[in-house]
Image: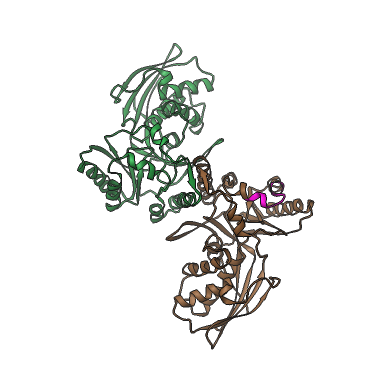
Chain colours: A brown, B green
């Protein structure tokens, strides 16, 4: 194969109680990469669309470019050159794992073109290196679910220990992306560095409850566990109307609602697609009340990760 | 029914990473209560054996007595009197839920004799009141599994939210009770009141991993998740030879090993009964090396909770 077109999904990291340890993928939005082999070594980013000119075409600063470079070095094939086109089909800086989707699409595409020397799970460290460029640290809570699909637990970063768990078929995510921006580094900076033992216990109970709720499955338990007493209280103040939008989601029937990644997008989980649509619309309408425009997305939990598209 | 004999199992609370939120029951050791209706109101504790005279016969100070009193008040039957005999078949102050087993056996026996007006789960708050007498606070991580059997998650205390999850059939617990004592109130007092965000994230990853490992099931994941970075480092110093005994358990094939409740007992989990026996013996031998005598117990995860015995 000389050329491939790959789509990698957006992701919701943290998932209320699971700061840095939980993430799941959705079907839309996502990123598309076209990767083509060429005779001369090196990677050229020949086109980026959908980013309003904000992403760097310099390979060493581009999450997809870095991920592919690290991958080629690992398999000892830096002699292989690529031309890369990136089509952003999702908002940047939205808390939906935009940089992760690009890195995953890139490294997945490269591995396909190289004849799949590595398994999908083995691609994770290279996609994480792409994340390091965007976020300053090599997180896996977006990259993991975008690469593997499903709901992901990152049990440990050192050594990296990623677990994929089943989710109930009728579980749908509603995402609202308000047209405001939150810088991820700022969003980390405002977090408390110390947490009380009792708050930690409350959060651990919800972490355990969410995993059990997804696996049993028990929709009510999922809802009761989608509570974040550590991160959300700090970050919610960066998102105007957060409390009102969350209340609107719950009022419309969501099991739970919180910040997607470091925001400003919010996500909600619901039982059934119809409820999830109503929840998404309720969130959009609530933002609109104060003049904030937004995009909404409704999706089941993506079970597949990256997908090869017809050229 | 006028008279009943009930056995309630010992329990391992905390289970490494799950301070205050995890607990499981074992088949042995445990407590036995004989409860008999009588015509005059009030509860008389007519006999306690196996406690070396250390437990109070005064009803208001006895965990089983309190639990039954609270239960009778709730169902509006304080007119019904009981004679109670308690036979401790387990060590006191050992970190194995001794007071919880007594409270559970008592309230379960009373509910049976009253014609089961409450479900087993509904008995929990009364057994917890018994715990309050022993520990100063109404914890559920011993009472929950002793009453319900299995592996228990306490997602929340207020409101009380208890979830029972399946455990793999071949999972066995090894328990070693060294003949030293740790006061539960002291054991709580030495804990850090503030925890760093990064330590909290590590613990949350292990909490999520342990629930997933038990439910998948995945024995290796169970083992990797049986890690406590918050409580064990503080409490281990109260138990002489802790590091050496834990190392001996792992060396003998245990998936993981930590402190049972607030100690001084240690528990380990293993795949298979034979391994669990070798692990228990290795832990006992290690304590013996420094002249500390101990009792060992090997059991699958108890799935039943309290049991009615022939009179």
Left or right? Give the position of A218 relative to B304: right
Quadrant where the image shows the N terminus of chain B: top left
Magenta: main secondary structure: helix
Residue B184 versus residue B130: which sits nearer the camera?
A: B184
Given residues B33 and B97, the one toward you in this image is B97
Relative horizontal placement of residue B278, taking residue B215 as reference (left or right): left
Q: Furthest residue to the bottom?
A: A39
The quadrant holding residue B90 is: top left
Which residue is drawn at the image coordinates 76% and 58% (left, top)?
Answer: A293
Residue A59 picture location, percent across and down = 57, 76
Tell me: residue A92, above or below residue A21: below
- Judge whether residue B96 can be spotted in this image: yes
Q: Which residues are magenta?
A: A235-245
Of residues B168 and A3, the one nearer the viewer is A3
Residue A5, percent from left and from top: 60, 77
Q: Give x and y (percent) for residue A182.
A: 66, 58
Across and down, in percent, residue A307 comes to: 58, 71
Q: Quadrant of the C terminus of chain B?
A: top left
A244 within the magenta span: yes
Q: Is residue A310 magenta?
A: no
Vertical placement of B277 versus B143: above or below? below
Residue B58, above or below A274? above
Q: Is residue A120 visible?
A: no
Q: Quadrant of residue B280?
A: top left
Instruction: Tell me: B177 left or right of B103.
Output: left
Q: How many circles with numbers are drawn on the protein?
A: 0
Tell me: residue A145, above or below residue A51. above
**Residue at image point 54% right, 66% down:** A132
């Amino acid at each position: 194969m000389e050329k491939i077109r790959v789509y990698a999904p957006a992701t919701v990291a943290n998932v209320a109680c699971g700061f840095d340890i939980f993430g799941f993928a959705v079907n839309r939005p996502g990123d598309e990469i076209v990767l083509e082999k060429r005779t001369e070594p090196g990677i050229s980013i020949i086109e980026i669309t959908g980013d309003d000119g904000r992403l760097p075409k310099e390979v060493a600063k581009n999450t997809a470019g870095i991920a592919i470079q690290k991958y080629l070095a690992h398999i000892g094939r830096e002699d292989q050159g690529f031309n890369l086109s990136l089509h952003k089909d999702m908002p940047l800086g939205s808390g939906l794992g935009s940089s992760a989707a690009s890195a995953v699409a890139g490294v997945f595409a490269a591995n396909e073109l190289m004849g799949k020397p590595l398994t999908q799970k083995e691609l994770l460290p290279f996609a994480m290196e792409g994340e390091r460029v965007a976020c300053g640290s090599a997180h896996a809570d977006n990259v993991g679910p975008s690469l593997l699909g499903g709901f992901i637990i990152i049990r440990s970063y050192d050594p990296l220990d990623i677990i994929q768990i089943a989710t109930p078929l009728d579980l749908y995510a509603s995402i609202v992306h308000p047209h405001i921006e939150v810088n991820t580094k700022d969003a980390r900076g405002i977090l408390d560095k110390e947490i009380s033992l009792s708050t930690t216990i409350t959060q651990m109970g919800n972490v355990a409850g969410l995993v059990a709720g997804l696996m049993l499955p028990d929709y009510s338990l999922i809802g009761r566990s989608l509570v974040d007493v550590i991160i959300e209280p700090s970050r919610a103040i960066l998102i105007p109307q957060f409390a009102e939008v969350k209340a609107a989601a719950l009022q419309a029937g969501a099991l739970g609602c919180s910040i997607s990644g470091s925001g400003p997008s919010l996500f909600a989980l619901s039982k059934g697609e119809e409820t999830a649509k109503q929840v998404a619309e309720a969130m959009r309408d609530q933002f609109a009340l104060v003049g904030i425009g937004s995009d909404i997305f409704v999706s089941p939990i993506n079970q597949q990760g990256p997908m090869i598209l017809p050229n």
